[in-house]
Each structure stands twice: as structure tokens, then as C-alpha cells.
Image (spheres, helix red, strand yellow):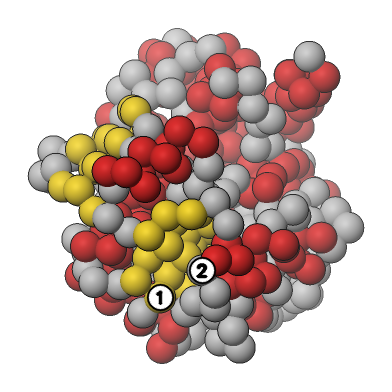
Amino acid sequence: MKVAVLGAGAIGAYVGAHLSRAGAEVHLVARGPHLEAMKTAGVRVLSARGDFVARPRVTDDPGRIGPVDHVFLGLKANGYAAAGPMVKPLLHAKTTLIAAQNGIPWWYFHKLPGAYEGYRIRSVDPDGAVTAALPVERAIGCVVYAATEITAPGVITHLEGTRFSIGEPDGSISDRCSEFSAAMIAGGLKCPVEADLRRDIWLKLMGNIAFNPISALARATMAGICRHLGTRELVVQMMRETLAVATALGADPDISIERRLAGAERAGEHKTSTLQDLEKGKPLELDVLLQAVVELAGLTGVEVPTVRAVCALADLLNHQLVSA
């Protein structure tokens, strides 16, 4: 099996190292000091489960890789629209695009029976550029439950979780999903093929939609947000509104808000990816987390006043960051 990891950052390099350890032919696409370190010394994974070094192929030019069986997208979703030129040389007739992203994916309504089948989420794919770059028929969804960090160039520190749930938009248990899942499991990761991956999407989004923007606005960790009574209640209200939108779309996350909060508390003094991006001066990933839910709330007629308010504040913060 031949795999390209496009965006071999903390999650991408972590996945690539495990697939390489399983015997897959893995090509990491990266840049800068991280790229040079991995070229020289491989990918070093530090984990309570056991440290190891993997030596996948590494490049900054996807054109040197050629067609692959699977492209694992380790990019932030706000970089998908521009990914077409990088993805194109990696494709053959059956290449899959495994989108390991937070929030609502561009393929969400692809092959979803019901009134909204085929609906293009404009906040996620405003002019169709994402669909043009990443054709929906190639898409396999992926919900990441692992937390990792680049602690030095070429060094990935695993913090928690090893689960990468994947699934087809049409809910089938396909051969292409099963093949990728088997390789991930052989490398030491959990990779269940879910018949209803949209449930997992909403389960994770319940936390992301609240903790990510609040952490950036307040410069707070997940545990810090939970300890403060005001922000804890804000999280609860945002989760309630998000669940209402999910229910209106026919999804059933089937988890209590208190249980979701308890999971966040266990993360401790963890900085969300949005807060990390803010501290690095990078644009914030808001479209798939907040703006998409606001759009879907309008589509389904669900009132989400708290989500709208936090979305507006986070959007202003992002505009100030981008224009600085």
C-alpha cells in the first residue's frame, strides 16, 4: 500500500510513522526545519506507549511521489481549497482522500439521503474550490481522537488517544476503508470503520465548537475553561445548541453534555489547536467549527444565539490577527 501524507505536522507525521512501521510505503510532504530533520533522522515518536523511530520517505514536492493509494490530509481545513496542485500528482483512478479534519467537512451532504442531499456548505466551500481540489467521490472521512505535538523538528510527542475513526459518506463498509484501517491497526493505532461517521463528527464537534474559540478568546486551557463557572456554563449552552442542530439534521451523537465536559477536564492544561494557532500568529480554523454550524442552524431553522455570539467574537479576533 502506498500512502502520501500531505501536511506532515503533528498528526500527519504521527500517522505516517505508524503506517511506515506497519510496512506501508509512506511519503511525508512537509517543509522547513521539520522536513530537514525527518530527512536526516526519520520521525521520532515519543509516547507513554513506547518511543520509536520510523523512516518514511520525505519530500516537499508531491510531484516526486507519483500516484498513491491513499492521501492522508494532515492540513487544516482552511488550507483545503488551495491543495489542488499538491493533490493532483498523487491521484490515480482509485486514490482516496482521507480528510483528518475538525468540524463539518465539505463532503458532509454527499450521499446523505434526505432533503439536504448534495447541499454545498458555503461557509466551508464558498465557491466550490474545495470540491474542485478534493472531489467528494474520493473522500473518506476521518475523526481524530489523538493529541500530538511537534516538540522539536522531526520529533512528535504523543499526548493522548490513538483512535482515528474513518468512514464512507454513504455509510458503507468499503474495501478501501478496510484496507486503510488494517494498515493503521498493524502500525499500532485504533482505526474503526464506522457506518455512521457523522455521529463521530458531531461528538467531537461538541467540544471543538466551544473549547476552541473560547480558549483563544480567553487564552485559557481546557481545564481552565471548565474551572471557571461562567465559561463552563457558556460551553454547556454552546453544546446544547450544537446538539439541536445535529438532531435537526438527523444525527444522534448520543452523549451527555456532562460526560463531554468530563472528557475535556481530563485533558487538563491542554491548549486547543486554535489557541496554539493564535500564539503562532496563524489564521484561526473557524469556518468548519463555528461558521458551518451557524449556516446549518439557518438551514434547519434552529436558534443558536450563543454560538452566533462566540462566532462573531472569534471572527473579529481572526480578522485582527490576519490584518496585523
Q: What kind of element bears circle 1?
A: strand
The answer to whether residue 28 is visible is yes
Please name the residue shown 64% across and 42% down the image: 289
**Mark on residue 2?**
1
Residue at the limit of the structure toward the right, as seen here: 127
| Residue 297 picture location, percent across and down | 76, 49
Q: CA distance from mark 1 to mark 2?
A: 10 Å
Q: Quadrant of residue 315?
A: top right
Depth order, front residue of 117/269: 269
Q: Which residue is mark 2?
A: 65
Looking at the rendered structure, the kind of residue marked 1 is: Lys
Give the quarter of the figure containing the N terminus: bottom left
Depth order, front residue of 106/30: 30
Of callouts 1 and 2, the N-terminal one: 1
Q: Quadrant of residue 228?
A: top left
Q: Quadrant of residue 111?
A: bottom right
Q: Is residue 135 left or right of residue 103?
A: right
| Label 1, residues with CA under 10 Å away: few <14, some 14-19, many ≥20 | some
Please name the residue shown 43% across and 70% down the image: 3
Q: Circles 1 and 2: CB distance less than 8 Å? A: no
| Residue 223 picture location, percent across and down | 37, 19
